[in-house]
Every structure is written in C-alpha cells, then in structure tokens.
Image (cartoon, coloured by chain):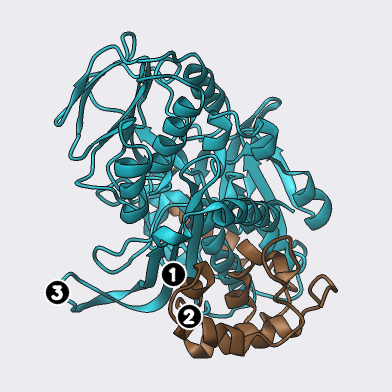
Amino acid sequence: MNTLNRRQFLKLAAAISAMAAVPRAVGAATTAPRVVVVGGGFGGATLAKYVRMWGGNVQVTLVDANPNHVSCILSNLVVTGALPMSRITLGFDSLKANHGVTVMQGRAIAIDAPGNTLTVSTSSGNQVLPYDHLVLSPGIDFMPVAGSTWNPNLTPHAWQAGPQTTLLKNQLAAMSSYDTFVMTVPKAPYRCPPGPYERACVVADYLKRKGRTGAKVIVLDANAGITAEPEAFGHAFNVTHAGTIEYYPNATVQSVDASTRSIVTTAKTVNKAKVLNYIPNQRAGAITNGLPLDSAGFVPVNPLTYGIASYPNIHVIGDSCAVPSSDKKPVPKSGHMANSEAKICADAIIRSFNGEAPDADIATSSACFSPITNQTSSWLSTNFIYGDIFDASGNVKGKGMHRVDIGEAASDMVDGDSYQDMFIWADSMFADSYI
Amino acid sequence: MDISILIRAALAGAALLVAAAPANAESGRLLASQCAQCHGTNGAGPGFEQIAGKDIFNDLIDMKYRPIEGIMDRQARGYTDEQLRLISDYLSTLPGNGDN
C-alpha cells in the first residue's frame, strides 16, 4: 500500500472485479481456500465457526482488535450492577480449539481488493493476510453531531460494550437523589432498536430501587416515536416508571458540551446533567471506508451472499450492512441478526468454493429480550424471507429480505418468566456464536 | 503501479487453483441453523426446548397458526410451511444432546 490508499485500490478493483472475482475452482491444488473475517462480534464469530463447521478444509482467520469480545447483549445489566463484566465477556478460545479458527489480534487497516489481501496492524507490526473471500463484520462507527467536541470519556455512549460500560456504570452509581440521567436515542438505523429504551427502563429501575429520590431519566429520542416495542416501552415509560422517565421524541441533537454534560436538541435542552449518556448517530465500521455506502452510511449487500456488487468476494454482515428490504420494514441491526446473516454468508461462500450458486430458499430472524425492571422483561421477534420486496404503495421494487412477521410481548407476557428466558436466549446465542 | 499490472495480477490470482473439499450442503441445514440462536448449534443446546432428533413439524405448524401465546408462535410465522418441513426433516436427522 505504498503508492495507493485504500480508496484508490478499491476504485481500481472495481474496474477489474469481474476477473478478480472468478470463483476459485475445486480440484487438484496446493492451498486450501482462505476466508478472512474482520470483527469478532456475533457476526464475525458465527461466520468463522460455521465456515469451519460446514466448509471442510477451508482456512479461516478471525481478526479482532481485542483479545475477546464484550457483548452488548445483557450489557445494560452490567451498567446497573446486576451482572459482572465477566458475564458478557466472550473469548475466542473455543473457536480455536473446537473449530480450528486462527485468531489474529490486531486492527484491520487496509484492503487491497485487486490483490485479495487484508493488512492488519498488530503488536508485532503489519501483517498481510491473503484471502479468497473477505468478510467484514466491524459493527458500528459513530457520527457525533458536528460542531461539538465529542468526548466519550466524559459522556459515555456505552454502545460498544467494554470500558464504556464500566464508565457508565460508575457514573450511574455516583448519582444522588434529584440528579438527572440524560440519554439520547440515535436516529434510525442504529444498533439494537430496543436497546436505548431498555437502558432507560433499567436505569430508572435502579435509581428507584437504590432510593435516589427524585432522580430522573430524560430520554431524548431523535426519532418521531419509540422505534421498537412501542407498547411495552410505552407502558413502561407511562406506568411502570412514570415520574422517573421523561420521554421527548423528535429530539435531534444540535450540540453537546461534554465538559458540562449539557445537550441541546430540537425538543429539549438540558444543562449540567449528572450523567450524559450521549449515543451518537451511527454508520458502518471504519474498515468499510472506500466501499460503496448508502445515504445512511451502511454498505448495500446482496442478501443471498452478503457480497458487495463491485467486489463479490468481499462480504459485509451485521450492523455495517444494508440489506434490501420492503419500505418501512427494515432488517434490524442486532447481534441475533448478525448471527443469522453470518450463516447465510458462510453457506454462500462454501457454495462458491464448490462452484455452486447461493441458496435462495433462505430466511433470517432476530429475537431478543429487554428487561423492564430487575425482575421482568419484554421480548421482540421479527422474521424475514428472501423474495419480492415492496415499496410503500405495495408495488414490487425488487428482491430482498421481506419482513413476514414482527411482534412484541403482549402486556401479560412482560413478566418474570420472560426475564428468566432472557438468560436462556443470551447463553444460547453466546454458545452458538462462540462455542 | 498501473492498471494493466493490476489486471495481470488479478488474472494470475484468479487462475490459481485452490483446494476445496467442503461437504455438500444438506437440504434444510441452512434454514435449520436459524433455530440455533435459541436452541443451540445443531439443536443440541444450550437453550430452550430440545429440537433435534425428533419430528417437530406438527408442533411448528401448531405454533404458526394458533393465536400468539409466546415468542415461538411469532418465530414459526417467519417460515413457509415448506420451509418448516425442511427444517423439521433436517433436525430429525441430528442427534441433539441425547436427552430425548
């Protein structure tokens, strides 16, 4: 990468992508096919595991900047102290031992698309990894409001779990009676649609249980209304946590002062909050810079392969990708969905090594549980099938993942059983992705 | 570096034969893998109810068409009847966790 930067390389790659993407043939050969995966979250871990499990002798290298992955799933319960950080810390050892995945700790810094290599910055210098297929599962990057000095050490987002989670936990624990916890809900699409509302609930529940009399949770939502589980969270805000949670829709962030923890939005201004949990708007992870992005900053993909049109042997899964879907029925960005997409991508890559077309009889799904208090949980479920997708008038606009079902827990299902089910679901997800 | 060099390099790369011996995908395997987030890889747990090693088609159809009682009734609505058949047939061939 001495003479061309990543963007230039990718532009050149577009000119010759048809040739560069000739499927690797099966037959007498000297090297096993190579898959390189960037990002050890739920998408990347699942992809690595399932390519190894289903792909015979395919070599898989998983690249992650950290020695393990800290799950956003259940992380709001670490913020409230209900769970220890170790409960959501997921190692890569089983991927190595059980599935033969090679794990490289380092930061992916450059893609040479025509050369089919990825450069990784590691503690022992740059490593260049050749690949036949490259899968990017880098999660999200943040787009903080322009004109403000963003300092996540002062105003933690805790929307990537780990040290940020601990920071927010400590700030919450330091709150006193009559203090104010202010949080933002990013403009959709963002990671984990129900997540911000869940956080508001468990923070309010914490403040009440800990006797912080008069303490408030102020929710500043950039969207026109609650974007996920409106019934369950509406009830939680208006009844369960009434008097503690104040909810403001259409609150587009205009400026943030990290040093004073003050925020100006189009709906509400708060000066000198005790805690300012500013969760900025989001886009695809930085390694996708130079790839084609949609207007929201995510990478459009082919839903049969998660490949990119210009670079068929580069795939994007999870939060960073934009899946073609029917209007007003978007594919959510979630760990569960990333796991779901990873399996389709893994199957398509293995088929391409065999010279087969991708499977078109496919379905994806997402399900999750959201605690409302320290004893009750709601849930959300949504499913997609590949086929025709529709515009707002009901006219077919192409092929993609059409949402065939969505639903949340009815009010009588927001209960202790769901709270216990949340841990069964999370542990199953953790195991299916990492063990 | 010019484009012609890159094109030659790409052609050389494309011509390289690489060995692949992945098993042929079994019908229903990919669809059934979408159950694993909640029922474990290959339906073998950890997770909710045991789903491998038995025929669950009628259960899935019941859940798909009855009024919503819980989250699985929603998930069952996410597949065609034919897909539920493929999923069930595939899972029935798996050993599960031996706790049937």
Residue named by callout 3? A393
Tag 3 subunit:
A
Contact, mark 1 vs mark 2 (Cβ under 8 Å): yes
- Looking at the rendered structure, the kind of residue marked 2 is Tyr
Closer to the chain start, of discs 1 and 3, is 1
Residue named by callout 2? B79
- Looking at the rendered structure, the kind of residue marked 3 is Ser
Marks 2 and 3, how far apart in space? Answer: 24 Å
The secondary structure type at the circle numbered 3 is loop
Which mark identifies residue A383? 1
Q: Colour of chain A?
A: cyan
Looking at the image, is A257 positioned above or below residue A23?
above
Pick whichever, A219 or A382, lies toward us.
A219
Q: Which residue sits at x=50%, y=69%?
A: B70
Q: Residues within 10 Å of mark 3 (few under 14, many from 20)?
A: few
Q: Residues within 10 Å of mark 1 (few under 14, many from 20)?
A: many
Q: Colour of chain B?
A: brown
Q: Is residue A212 left or right of residue A254?
A: right
The location of residue A180, given as percent across then percent down, is 34, 19
- Looking at the rendered structure, the kind of residue marked 1 is Asn
Q: Is residue A221 left or right of residue B25?
A: left
Mark 1 against mark 3, which lies toward the viewer?
A: 1
Marks 1 and 2, how far apart in space? Answer: 8 Å
